[in-house]
Amino acid sequence: MDLFEYQGKEFFAEYGMPVSPGGLAFSVEEAVGVAENLGCPVMVKAQVHTGGRGKAGGVKFAADINDVAEYAEKILGLDISGHVVERLWIEKASDIADEYYVSFTLDRSAKKHLGMLSAEGGVEIEKVAEENPDAIARIWVDPVEGLSEGNCRNWVKEAALPEQAIEGTVEILLKLYKAYVDGDADLVEINPLILTDDGRVHVLDAKVTLDGNSVFRHETYKEFDETQTRDEREKAAHSKGLQYVGLEGEVGVIANGAGLAMSTVDVVNQVGGRPANFLDIGGGANADVMTAALEVINNDPDVKSIFINIFGGITRGEEIANGIIDALDRVEMRSPIVIRLDGTNADEGREILEPHLSQALQLAPTMLTGAEQAVALAKGTKN
Amino acid sequence: MSIFVNAETKVIYQGLTGSQGRYYGLLNRDYGTKVVAGTNPKKAGTDVEGIPIFASVAEAVEETGATASCIFIPAPGVRSAVLEAAQGGVDFIVAITEGVPAHDEALFYNQLRKDFPNVQLLGPNCPGIISPGECNIGITAGHIALPGGPVGIVSRSGTLTYQALYELKEKGIGCTTCVGIGGDPVPGTSFIDCLAAFEADPDTKAVMMIGEIGGSAEEEAAEFISNNMTKPISAYVAGVTAPAGKKMGHAGAIVSGGRGTAQAKMEALEAAGVRVGNNPTEAGELMAEIVSQL
């Protein structure tokens, strides 16, 4: 789950890290109201789940209220890499003497937590990694041992942070690691972490991704679920509990199992089609979940054909076939469907489907031919 | 022969009294797996269809001599279940449960390394392991696998594993052991663990690998293959068309910051001499070709 900057800052503040006072605004009026309460100068910052906000004109320094109104007007509705700005974070501007970078994430290869610290903050870390890799000091933290103050002191030294920033940074590193671990984050990143003119180390931006699997021990994370960026199709699928990712093509895809679903999307692409989505309905493939899946795909206006690719394991072919027939009774489909059914009792399953077959409901012997049939239907080259 | 588990492996099911544990535990027993015990502190002394329930893994090990454990506990309890199994004395732990927080996985992975270096954890979020005709631990439909070898399978995906087993069976090709390592960010068992075990197993003559986007496990496997594997390998990597930044069903299946793409993985494997198919069927055909030339 991706947090907006302001949510990330609230999250950091709960763990005792210093952030700037500010307020959320959904309109120019609200932005002006927040700025009046805070007192100018303020920063007007677009809240979107993507990087490159500054370059896109989504972050502005406002010296007075007129600036606030002007920038709020400009930024609201701005499209930043496909993300339309609906909310603004207005916060008290800071005097910046120096900028740093810090993050924690899981190093899947080392199977340890990876901390990255750099005295070159405020720019894209990927760029620093490319152009000046030595400017990033890395530390691998064993989850069992945790991160000690001693570790942090050595780390800050290695990153060559200036003397006056050391105490404040060490304190923030310890708190940030605690937030990362106790908060079950996939990623916490502060870029920039700043040194102010009066010598304080301060959090100026926040990028936080939380582990959706940890919601059972973080009741409050449910609210973040509502602010995730999802298109209409993804929202509908999410509300039905389906594993769905929207893509941009015309062939709707339904498969059981994440790997098979990914593979089905690939194969549709390989035979010259464009998949409309990734959709994993899980192992069972019963009528209820199949109905939900068909409803979501049926509501996608771009879909011109549907490829259902099911492999029966424990769930037998007959059960799957009956589930599909049941689901088709419940949903009035706009697009023709190709079914590939294989695995346990596939023959019995196909026999059940047989009397229902038509131009609009075809059976395919293999995954490849099924993809070809579905792509042909989508292109209208075959009826 | 097989790797990790065989006909003699005695298995405890943590969560045998729950609906999933009971369903798959009994299916596994029907397959021939030695399901010797279940655990549930509240139901100790009872049984599930004749399988005795103990209060803890330690007690179950003491009473039955079990060496493996299979976890069907809901996600919040997996961290303590894994540690209980290791402390209880088993040396092979299969965690089927999906939805375990990544921080828990990182913690118990490192805890096991430190305190129980001889314990092998498989999963979480995996279909389990099957040595066809000998032992099936987890949720794989046993009948889709043909016993006997000569192929060993290791895979990050459940259904693609079934697909692979099935396609090999259709071609009359058997399997020594099929290991589903799962799709989570910190899998207890890696491709490399399985490749090394297959290389050492005299009955496994070739290996089929099924990977997917996310992380760098396939690239690391490719390096291992270059340096250590003498047996031929075919592979498939799912997710060529997956968009960046989206989790494709599995918690670990995500391309982030341009890393973890299927293309990079396929290239690395090919460079290591692996025959890579563009889809599961092609990988199966490549394996059939490899087997015919053995």
Image (spheres, helix red, strand yellow):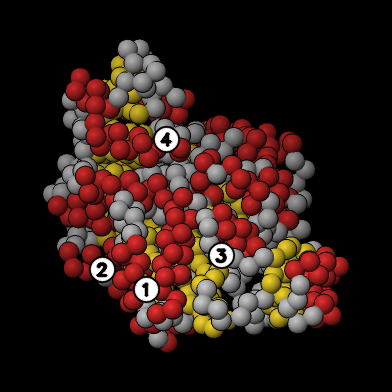
Q: How far apart are labels 3 and 2 at the CA level?
A: 44 Å
Q: What subunit carries mark 2? A: B
Q: Secondary structure at mark 3?
A: loop
Q: Are marks 2 and 1 in contact (CB under 8 Å)?
A: no
Kindly identify the amino acid type of the residue bearing the numbered disc 4. Answer: Gly
Marks 1 and 4 close (CB-CB < 8 Å)? no
Q: CA distance from mark 1 to mark 4?
A: 37 Å
Residue of label 3: A18
Quick one: SS at disc 2?
Answer: helix
Chain identifier of the residue bearing label 4 in the image: B
Q: Horizontally, is A202 left or right of B43 in the view?
A: right
Asked whether the residues under marks 3 and 2 belong to the same chain, the reply is: no
Residue carrying label 1: A156
Q: What residue did someone put label 4 on?
A: B77
* Real-space CA distance between mark 3 and mark 1, rounded to the nearest whole angstrom: 18 Å
Residue drawn where x is 32% and y is 38% of the image: B82
Looking at the image, is mark 4 or mark 3 nearer the viewer?
3
The answer to whether residue A321 of the structure is visible from this angle is: yes
Q: Secondary structure at mark 4?
A: helix
Tell me, yes or no, whether the two marked residues, 4 and 3, touch with CB atoms within 8 Å. Answer: no
Task: For mark 3, name the chain.
Answer: A
Tag 1: amino acid: Val
